[in-house]
Amino acid sequence: MKFTIIMLSCCLALVAGTIGCQNVEANYQEGVTALEAGDYETAMKRFRSAAEEGHAGAQAAIGELYNRGKGTQRDAEEAAKWYRLAAEQGHVDAQVTLGWMYNVGTGVPENFTEAIKWFRLAADQGHPGAQNNLGVLYRQERGNQDDVKNAVGWFEKAADQGMAPAQYALGQMYLNGEGLEQSTEKAVEWYTRAANQGLLEAQADLGFLFATREEKVPQDFLFAYKWLSLAVQKGDKIAKTDLAKLVATMTNDQIEEAKELVQKDPN
């Protein structure tokens, strides 16, 4: 709603009124068409025309072009400037990107507080990536118990929207009793959700848990083989070692059955 009000305010300030709004949107759409065709220079011109009239989407697009060096020289500081203009209008993707830039110190000084600020604005709009990023930052900070609680809360919001890294983080936190009551069963549940989405780390850890028969995790050679194999296919060296140890304990029939299980899995 805030974004809509600001955009209307910008449009109403144009001398041409409604026609001016239409021209701004037309420039933006022409920029999108040029971008899709790989004509970055034309895209930059059209986006700039719209951005200078306050179009948040165009401002974010210019930021992305500067950030990637498409149609112009790569310039992280210039990218941050345009992302900020869009972010201040409520453009959620620009808010996420600006938060990331502050987190790593690209185009702007590294600043944890600013990163949190922009991620929070996007997270409050329901952006799962921003919610996950907040969880990561609060978990890394670990300054007090509130940080851990905040991390769990944001990971849960992102995980409920299907964000695999957040699901994996919750699995870790349940496994270690970090900010949550320790529960291997809950850890396996969250690892499985992330692993089913193809997240390598979750697949490797889940395979290890099934192979080593951790507390409350039934030893299941077939599932262990499946998840470790999928992780190995993605280049995980530790999973490769764990898989070799597992295979040494399995019968030929178990190995063949496990291979069939892997072939049926798209992850």
Image (cartoon, grey):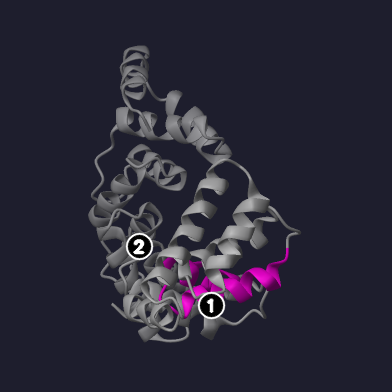
Q: What's the residue type where badge 1 is placed?
A: Leu
| 195 lies left or right of 108 | left
x 55%, y 40%: residue: 238
29 and 116: which is toward the camera: 29
Image: 75 above or below 195? below
x 35%, y 62%: residue: 128
Q: Which mark is residue 98?
A: none
Residue stretch rendered in magenta on the structure? 75-101
Confirm whether the magenta stretch covers residue 45: no
Image: 208 above or below 25? above
Helix, strand or loop for disc 1: helix
Circles 1 and 2 in contact, beta carbons < 8 Å: no
x 52%, y 75%: residue: 53
Q: Of helix, strand and loop, which mostly describes the magenta segment?
A: helix
125 and 102: which is toward the camera: 125
Residue 247: name its quadrant. top left
Pointer 2 residue: 128
Q: Is residue 142 shown to the viewer in this render?
A: no
x 56%, y 61%: residue: 47
Tag 2 or tag 1, which sits nearer the N-term?
1
**Residue farthest to the right, as pictured:** 73
Q: Nearer the viewer, mark 1 or mark 2?
A: 1
| 62 lies left or right of 10 | right
Q: What's the residue type where badge 2 is placed?
A: Pro
Confirm whether the magenta stretch covers residue 92: yes
Q: Residues within 10 Å of mark 1 (few under 14, many from 20)?
A: many
Q: Residues within 10 Å of mark 2 (few under 14, many from 20)?
A: many
Pointer 1 residue: 85
